[in-house]
Amino acid sequence: MTNAYAAGEAASRSALQIDAVFFFITAVSLFFFFLVEGLLIYFAIRYRRKKASEDAATSDVKSHLVLEIVWVIIPSLVVLVFFAYGYVVYRDVTTPAPGSSDINVVARQFSYEFKYPDGNTTVDELRLPAGKPVKLIMTSQDVLHGFFLPDFRLKQDVVPGQYTYLYLQPDKEGTYDIFCTQYCGVGHSTMRAKLVVMSPVDYAKWAQAAKTAGAVMSLPEKGRDLLSKSGCLGCHSIDGSVKIGPTFKGLYGRESHLEGDREVVADEDYIRESIYDPGAKIVRGFPNVMPTFKGRLSDDDIAAIIAYLKTLSGGKSEREEEKKEKGERKK
Amino acid sequence: MAAEGSGHAHMDPAQAYDAAKLGIWTFLATEVLLFGGLFTAYIVFRLKFPEMFRIDHAHLNRLMGATNTVVLICSSLTVALGIAAIRKGKQGLLRLYLALTILLAAVFLGIKYVEWNEKFAHGLFPDTDVFFSLYFVMTGLHGLHVLGGMLVLGGVLALAWRGKFSERYYTPVEVSGLYWHFVDLVWIYLFPLFYLIG
Amino acid sequence: MAETTADGAAIPLNGNGRSKGYLEEKGFWSWALTLDHKRIGVLYLLTTLLFFLVGGIFGLLIRIKLMYPGQEIFSHHVYNVIFTLHGSIMIFLFIIPAIPSGLGNFFIPLLIGARDVAFPRLNLASYWIFVAGILIMLASLLRPMDTGWTFYTPYSAKTAADVTLLSFGIFLIGMSSILTGLNFIVTIHKLRAPGMDWHRLPLFIWGMYSTSIIQVVATPVVGVTFLLLAMERLFGIGFFDPAKGGDPLLFQHFFWFYSHPVVYVMILPAMGIISEVVPVFSRKPIFGYKAIAYSSLAIAFIGFFVWGHHMFVSGMSKTASIIFSFLTFFVAVPTAVKVFNWIATLYKGSITFESPMLYALTFIFLFTFGGLTGMFLGALATNVHVHDTYFVVAHFHYTMMGGTVVGFLAGLHYWFPKMTGRMLNEKLARLGWLLTFIGFNVTFLTQFFLGYKGMPRRWAEYPAQFQDLNIVSTVGSWILGAGILIMVVNFIRGYYAGEPAPANPWKSLTLEWQAASPPSTENFEKIPVVTDWPYGYAKRKPEGNE
């Protein structure tokens, strides 16, 4: 993750502009900080009572019109400048650039889905070609979320029932953090995504590959793809680590302890029920926050998912999956 | 000697009266803000859903609404007459007008009860749509204030029954009268906004 | 000893035939049903201080969890509950009521030369309504709140937590706040001693007057907001639910219409305390009395028009954002004026550094810094980056804790002798102050950098790059906790074993010091007739009472 004051290489022009405002306000504020606090400390020391005498001569000054007018006018002018500079840069970063391509963003508890103009979809990973302006058209499926790109110094809340917009132009290749900044529930801290900025050539290659990959898939591959695109991996891991929900690794065929002291073996029926009616059986120690996918996943989809989950409970296929998972995680 | 009513031993009668008047006006200011929030919501949603408001408001019973308006205006009149009476020391008249005011308030609530039941019978509930959410919440909150006013006026009537008031001291009557006028005034805004404007 | 005061109030006498100190009468009911504004003030102070400590413990728990980047210590859900409780308790049960209902209740009548507030029974009712609200809030802990203290919809309408019960609790607490404000407005208008013109009012009173106006105007709106939230959960009304034609942003507008002015409810009384303490310990008249008095009103007024600066990235229109940013900067000007006036008061004074003054100077130092960090938040471009990050958390802790809490502590140290009749131990007070000051800065200065680097608020776990600063901040919280603990020990020790206090240990000119330490039940034997401004230190030396 880039740091503003390091190397002068910003992720985008927006970062440079906003950092400049930061720097300006910091400089001016520091000046007044040292002036005001300096006088505070100086007066406190200089006019401290040196003897215990009560008769220490103190001045009777109660006002000074010129001074008071000056210290109203100067701060007013200073804050006006802060406002103006902040406004000008804000206007700049919230104005769409000509030729922006539209990317639809759908936020839900607890993942981001990105839909590209060419029909591609990715989850928790936004891929963009460097140097091209982009308009993110964002909405939420459930509660408020926030879309924050710290390296770009850009942020916009994502609201259910309406669209909000974020304009960006990534200039430098690299991988950048996307954080959720509007508290959205138990998965808020782990609702993170990555922005991968590639050269236009690499981006074109990736976009093409992603399209063809979607065309021919085996049933377990389709299941894996669905899990990714439906946001399941936001809460369930496939490598055994504990997230919001139980891990998928080894799930199929596993005996689970439920709330209310029941035991159940995770078979096809259990998996299907968990997807359509997640509240019916809660595994002990996990919160009841999973949404239903009724209407979003068909029976065929579920069959694919079950096929994939079965591969996570085998021996050899487990190791294969672990390798794929490690390869995908970029840090 | 100190004014009647404990807790005011530290104020003389003139101070206590002034304080009470300033107190009730300040309280009414807070009530304006309370209802003001809801009126703001009304404006916001009216601008957002003009069709919904036009269609839905026809479902409201204008006759009952208008009757209730008259009832409340009369009740403001009776409470004002009561204050005028006690200013001249007429305790009997005060009790009569207070009782009438409470009775009219009860009539208002009775008509409201019938009205709401009529809505429910037609399948119109607070969660039907935003118009009805506003209607039930605002008339409901107003109704609670009417009920509260009845209780306060009832307390004042009880004090009047025990002969606590005279032409020299009737502050609680005046203060609750002012509150009652406010409750009336809120309805005078609610009625046209919900029942009349298309 | 006469049995009534000159104006006819009965004087309760103790066994020695002398006027009863307000603390003398014992027994549960003498406290539970008291009409004495001083006792009611003490009840509020004890209640709010209790919740300050409870809220503080939740704060310490937050910091312990945040030392680790992963899922250690306790679950995310528990963390979400804890930060919600920390915020809600600190704001609703401590910071809003502490100075107004605590110190305000005790000292407003004394400062204006009155025997009590305008409506003592309403005052008592306000306290019990406050307690009822607290109990209902506690009852909601069976399904504890996990929404953050801002309760944004749709999450707060959907969560399994008992937001409905909680909303009613907060409604009652708000009602208590409104009634207290109403009481103070009438008291200040109608019960001033003869000769106490508006321009002879102590500046704490000007601060409390402005505060009370805000309380009375703003609180009903948040009351209605929580009522509507409860209705949404109970009856399915959808003002804030997009699925029903509602708008989540409407909730935010309603909520912040109150919650921005309420930060001025928090700071104006504290500023009033600073205006009292600084002249006394500089032995100089306050500089710019009228400017300080009117700036309180100006802050209250302007403060009503800036709430949108909490919503720049919420989806609110750009035009609204621009207007709100513009107006936001203007509330800084009357605030700055106060700071300049306090510093000018020090000029050519004769300054001593007893604990009240130590805290007062600390207030000026920390609040100025906190206020300057507000510039980054008011400016649109920089707000986009640091909104909803730890930068904001640091900013409001500097202003609310470095400001209000420090001002509150200055007031407690200043008025402790008057309230209890005993002096605090100065050495212990200084130790507590030093640890608090160091701990506070270590805890919260680091958070500005965390926020700038991009760490969002309300995160239970975080990527490893944020860990170092988090560890530093947590260690700071332990130092801060130690400082507060020492201060609390000093208060307890002072109450039971402190040196007996004279009536006017600080040789102040304001009226409360003319009453005994502690005051009698009726405050003054004779209502004073005021002939002078209370800050004429250079011109005359007040008698130091024995």
Image (spheres, coloured by chain):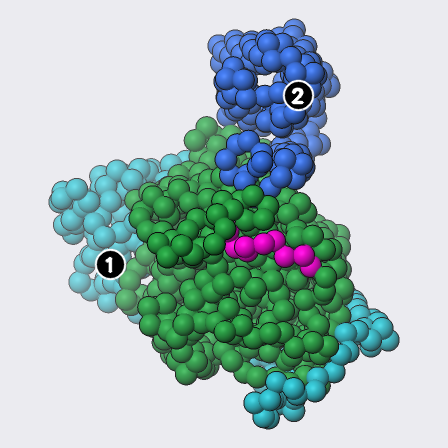
- Of badges 1 and 2, the one in the foreground is 2
Letter of the chain shown green in the rendering: C
Above/below status of C373 relative to B116: below
* Circle 2: element type: loop
Q: Nearer the viewer, residue C342 or B196?
A: C342
Above/below status of C183 relative to A4: above
Chain letter for the residue marked with disc 2 in the picture:
B
Quadrant of the image occupied by residue C58: bottom left
- Circle 2 residue: B167
Looking at the rendering, the stretch of residues picked out in magenta corresponds to C522-530
Quadrant of the image occupied by residue B63: top right
Is B42 in the magenta? no
Is residue C26 among the parts visible in the rendering?
yes
Quadrant of the image occupied by residue A17: bottom right
Query: What residue is at 51 percent from the left and 58 percent from the top?
Result: C103
Q: Which mark is residue C183?
A: none
Q: Nearer the viewer, residue C526 or B148?
A: C526
* Circle 1: element type: loop
Chain B is which colour? blue
- Circle 1 residue: A249
Percent x, y for residue C284? 68, 78
Query: What residue is at 24 percent from the left and 44 percent from the top?
Result: A282
Letter of the chain shown cyan in the rendering: A
| Mark 1 closeness class: few <14, some 14–19, many ≥20 residues within 10 Å | many
Q: Nearer the viewer, residue C37 or B182?
A: C37
Above/below status of C511 relative to C485: above
Secondary structure of the magenta portion, mostly?
loop
| Mark 2 closeness class: few <14, some 14–19, many ≥20 residues within 10 Å | some
Query: What residue is at 30 percent from the left and 41 percent from the top?
Result: A278
Query: What residue is at 63 percent from the left and 80 percent from the top?
Result: C282
Amino acid type assigned to the residue bearing label 2 in the image: Glu
